[in-house]
């Protein structure tokens, strides 16, 4: 037979101006009756479907223990979607999207659930053309992660041998300390290869966080001064004005260090301090981030008192509203010592940053929501304008604001108009966010699309997760021995001790 | 008004109450060439665009046929105060009305008003004449020319003219709003052939039917040109039918017929149907015109179906899409070349 077998390409897709659309596939969500599924995952998938970014041959299979039919599951998600996208849901698009939503009631601890799932997925391959590609999204409680992975592995569902892909998505928190993170990685790697694993930190899906990289590596003027020769110190702030709300039980277990610092703050630190990656691809980028984590000097247990501060909010006033203290929140112990605020002094021991402290802080019930990085430059070595003329003139500060209003501002010295030579600091605001005021896509939308397209650049690699835990491990151990969190009134920038952390070094926190 | 006076006026427009100058973020220059009748609409498009593409917009409203010279310049700014620390985004607009001799030298007016260091997009919302001195003078200023092949009365002739421009290495890159309007359709059609087991059908397509309305003729032609250029169909013959026009192509596995039917009443493109060996593919605008439904059938069996948002077709959105793009669009050029071959048959 002279017939040659050719791999056929879809030539119609062969051009740059048409957006890439993922291959057909099915996404299995474990924890499908939960909050994340209804509030984030399904709305993001709906947006992708509406915006023509999902293939026609796509299906979601939800799994959790609650008994529901496919239709009940769909209705429930429809209600959730309505809450998130009030008034902008199209009946027809929903109708067509929801035909691809399915539900299997089952306990994810039981092997039978996986046999059933396997059959169901096989059936979908035939009926909906999902082509053997599978994504397993773990959105259930973290204590179930190892079991689910093991069951998937035992059922042979982590294998990619018949052509289709099998990807595993892990939600945060990725472990609760270094040891459990290592265990979890070990458990997963028994069945999945690193290439198949997508650990989510939704901060990386934010357009504004990605913009830190654009600012640093697409502008020639910042990089030459981005080092210890010019930078005095760096401050990273991740502040929320909200309290723990209804997630008290969860927060009691986690605390600010695990909930925010281990992931979001460490990611922002990496993006700020890293060397330019050779390319914007998964390995190049993550390699550079890991190098930063490795260079962070471990805080020894007896230094914890000086280099780490934790706090917990009392009642107070936030923007005109009286709010209760953490201990009065729902599902929180009356004598809880869980921290809602963390400040750390970190040193990055490498050529670029030797001797430059990175002060990082994260907290709830701060005066306002703000995520920012501020690069504080050295004072000028000498100023010809002396005495009262330069009063109020401060060193240059470059602030990269990530939230809520994205932008860059630079504090520079300028002459006050008039005779004499009075010089003052002036804040120059460059709001690049508003230069492109397009509605930025939701972080989950971006990450789910990357995941389906098989691009792990904006996901966390195993060594990154472990690296971040290693830095925090001594702090957690130190704190577990001495159980006291300093108190701060809601609506302030944290406990006095946090001020002292910088005060010792003759510096102070910037007011965001 | 001199150039200095215009710049000073822009400064005054973004002056804060305390006398300091408000910030300006700009990403591009947009020069629109239009006539009195469309000037109002163009100004509205520019102001709607300002939020996403803060720019210096220069709207040239010219009437070269008047005897006496006349020049009238108006300056305005659209500011989008977003609160916070005095943040303002401004789109600055200069409206230049010219009559008589100055209208033959538009580039001498537009050139000095451009913001330095930013790309220049030249936009002809209506009909244009590519071989006029005025056009080539303006094109010299531009990094990209944006036209609308659907604006001229004869779409075919206009596409031929654009094809000439696109092939002229001395001209800046050309974009066409009709082509932008086609991208959701192209994307949806491409989606149909993504599953590996359907790719084979691409080589087996033997008939395509496109239902459009007379305003959508240029889109229908471009869609045909794109399919033919991508799939290697060579135009062979054309004929009028009782419903519209039919083109015959020589494809890799035999003859392909593309039938254009201008019978749609409510949408410039209404429905595209592709017949393969075993399967029939269709993308059609939904009864809600903002949505589109794709289907795959085997005989009477429905194999797949979905409804998506087709996108918005307001001028500012389509123009915005085109402003994001830089460089030459090879797919467009290839589609155009095929269209010219088709209409020359
Ligand atoms: N919610 C957020 O905003 C958010 C943000 C970031 C990260 N995350 C992470 O995302 C994950 C999910 O969070 P969530 O807020 O959606 O949690 P959740 O609302 O508590 O949902 C957990 C889900 O797991 C199911 N489940 C529990 N035990 C099960 C079992 N043995 N077998 C099958 N299903 C079981 C529960 O449903 P049944 O009771 O019906 O079985 C429920 O649907 C967590 O890892 C969380 O840390 C959440």
Image: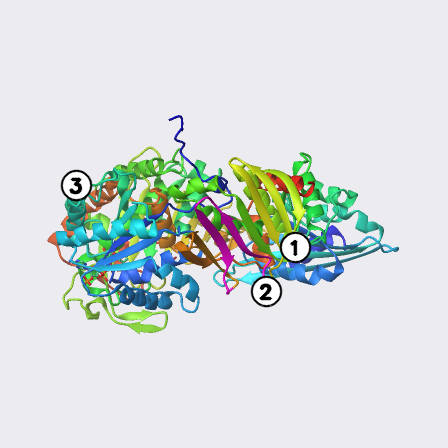
Helix, strand or loop for disc 3: helix
Near-viewer residue (B22 or A495): B22
Tag on residue A186? 3
> Which is nearer the N-term, disc 2 or disc 1?
2
What range of the chain is rendered magenta? B266-288
Chain name for mark 3: A
Q: Quadrant of the N terminus of chain A?
A: top left
- Most distant residue in the left direction: A481
Q: Name the quarter showing ligand 1.
A: bottom left
Residue in the picture at 33% in, 32% down: A351
Chain name for mark 2: B
Helix, strand or loop for disc 1: loop
| 1 vs 3, front mark | 1
The residue to which callout 1 is attached is B242
Number of other residues with Cα within 10 Å of mark 1, as a class: few under 14, some 14 to 19, many 20 or more: few
The residue to which callout 2 is attached is B17
- Most distant residue in the right direction: B67
Q: Are marks 1 and 3 in contact (CB under 8 Å)?
A: no
| 2 vs 1, front mark | 1
Q: Position of residue A374 (x, y in %)?
A: 39, 49
Q: Is residue A409 above or below residue A91?
A: above
| Side of B100 relative to B76 (left or right) | right
Q: Position of residue B334 (x, y in %)?
A: 59, 38
Residue B117 located within the stretch drawn in magenta: no
| Side of A439 relative to A239 (left or right) | right
Helix, strand or loop for disc 2: loop
Magenta segment's dominant SS is: strand
Quarter assignment of residue B99: bottom right
Chain name for mark 1: B
């Amino acid at each position: 037979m002279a017939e040659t077998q050719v791999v056929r390409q879809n030539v119609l897709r062969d051009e740059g101006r048409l957006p890439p659309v993922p291959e057909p596939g099915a996404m299995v969500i474990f924890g499908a009756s939960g909050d994340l599924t209804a509030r984030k995952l399904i709305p993001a998938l709906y947006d992708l479907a509406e915006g023509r970014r999902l293939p026609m041959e796509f299906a979601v299979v939800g799994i959790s223990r609650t008994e529901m039919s496919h239709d009940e599951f769909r209705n429930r998600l429809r209600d959730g979607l309505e809450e998130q996208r009030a008034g902008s849901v199209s009946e027809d698009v929903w109708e067509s999207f929801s035909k691809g939503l399915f539900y299997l009631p089952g306990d994810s601890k039981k092997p039978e659930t996986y046999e059933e799932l396997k059959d169901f997925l096989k059936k979908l391959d035939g009926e909906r053309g999902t082509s053997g590609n599978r994504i397993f999204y773990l959105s259930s409680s973290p204590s179930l992660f190892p079991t689910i992975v093991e069951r998937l592995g035992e059922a042979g569902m982590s294998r990619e041998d018949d052509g289709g892909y099998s990807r595993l998505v892990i939600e945060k928190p990725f472990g609760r300390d270094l040891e459990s993170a290592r265990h979890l990685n070990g458990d997963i790697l028994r069945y999945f290869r690193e290439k198949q694993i997508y650990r989510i930190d939704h901060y990386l899906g934010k357009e504004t966080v990605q913009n830190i990289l654009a600012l640093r590596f697409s502008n020639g003027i910042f990089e030459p001064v981005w080092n210890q020769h010019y930078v005095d110190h760096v401050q990273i702030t991740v502040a929320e004005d909200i309290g723990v709300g209804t997630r008290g039980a969860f927060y009691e277990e986690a605390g600010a260090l695990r909930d925010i610092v281990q992931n979001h703050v460490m990611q922002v630190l990496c993006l700020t301090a890293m060397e330019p990656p050779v390319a914007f691809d998964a390995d190049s980028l993550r390699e550079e981030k890991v190098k930063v984590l490795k260079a962070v000097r471990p805080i020894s247990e007896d230094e914890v008192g000086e280099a780490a501060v934790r706090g917990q909010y009392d009642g107070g006033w936030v923007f005109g509203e009286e709010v209760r203290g953490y201990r009065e929140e729902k599902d929180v112990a009356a004598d809880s010592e869980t921290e809602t605020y963390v400040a750390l002094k970190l040193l990055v021991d490498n050529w670029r940053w030797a001797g430059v402290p990175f002060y990082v802080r994260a907290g709830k019930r701060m005066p306002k929501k703000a995520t920012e990085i501020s690069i504080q430059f050295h004072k000028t070595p000498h100023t010809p304008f002396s005495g009262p003329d330069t009063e109020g003139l401060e060193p240059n500060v470059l602030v990269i604001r990530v939230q809520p209003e994205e932008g860059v501002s630079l504090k520079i010295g300028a002459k006050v108009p008039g005779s004499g030579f009075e010089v003052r600091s002036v804040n120059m605001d460059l709001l690049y966010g508003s230069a492109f005021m397009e509605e930025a896509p939701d972080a989950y939308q971006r990450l789910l699309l990357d995941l389906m397209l098989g691009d792990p650049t904006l996901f966390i690699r195993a060594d990154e997760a472990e690296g971040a835990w290693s830095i925090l491990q001594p702090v957690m151990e130190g704190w577990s021995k001495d159980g006291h969190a300093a108190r701060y009134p809601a609506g302030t920038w944290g406990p006095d001790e946090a001020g002292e952390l910088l005060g010792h070094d003759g510096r102070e926190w910037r007011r965001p | 008004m001199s150039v200095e006076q215009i710049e000073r006026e822009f400064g005054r427009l973004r002056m804060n109450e305390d006398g300091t100058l408000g910030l300006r973020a700009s990403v591009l220059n947009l020069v629109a060439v239009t006539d009195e009748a469309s000037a109002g609409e163009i100004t509205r498009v520019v102001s709607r665009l300002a939020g996403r593409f803060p720019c210096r917009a220069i709207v040239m409203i010219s009437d070269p046929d008047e005897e006496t010279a006349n020049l009238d310049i108006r300056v305005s700014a659209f500011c989008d105060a977003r609160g916070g620390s005095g943040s303002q985004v401004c789109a600055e607009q200069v409206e230049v009305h010219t009559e008589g001799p100055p209208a033959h030298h538009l580039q001498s007016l537009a050139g000095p008003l451009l913001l330095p260091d930013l790309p220049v997009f030249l936009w002809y919302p209506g009909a244009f004449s590519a071989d006029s001195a005025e056009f080539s003078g303006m094109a010299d200023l531009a990094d990209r020319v944006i036209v609308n092949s659907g604006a001229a009365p004869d779409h075919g002739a206009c596409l031929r003219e654009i094809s000439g421009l696109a092939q002229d290495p001395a001209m800046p890159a050309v974009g066409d709003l009709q082509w932008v309007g086609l991208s959701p359709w192209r994307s949806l059609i491409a989606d149909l052939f993504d599953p590996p087991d359907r790719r084979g059908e691409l080589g087996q397509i033997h008939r395509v039917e496109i239902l459009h309305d007379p305003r959508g003729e240029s889109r229908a032609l471009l869609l045909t040109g794109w399919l033919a250029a991508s799939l290697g169909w060579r135009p062979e013959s054309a004929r009028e039918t009782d419903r519209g026009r039919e083109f015959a192509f020589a494809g890799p596995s035999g003859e392909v017929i593309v039938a254009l039917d201008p019978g749609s009443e409510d949408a410039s493109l209404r429905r595209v149907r592709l017949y393969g060996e075993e399967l029939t593919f269709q993308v059609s605008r939904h009864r809600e015109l903002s949505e589109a439904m794709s289907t795959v059938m085997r005989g009477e069996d429905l194999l797949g179906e979905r409804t998506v948002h087709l996108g918005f077709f307001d001028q500012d959105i389509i123009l915005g899409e085109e402003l994001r793009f830089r460089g030459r669009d090879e797919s467009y050029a290839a589609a155009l070349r095929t269209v010219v071959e088709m209409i020359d048959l």
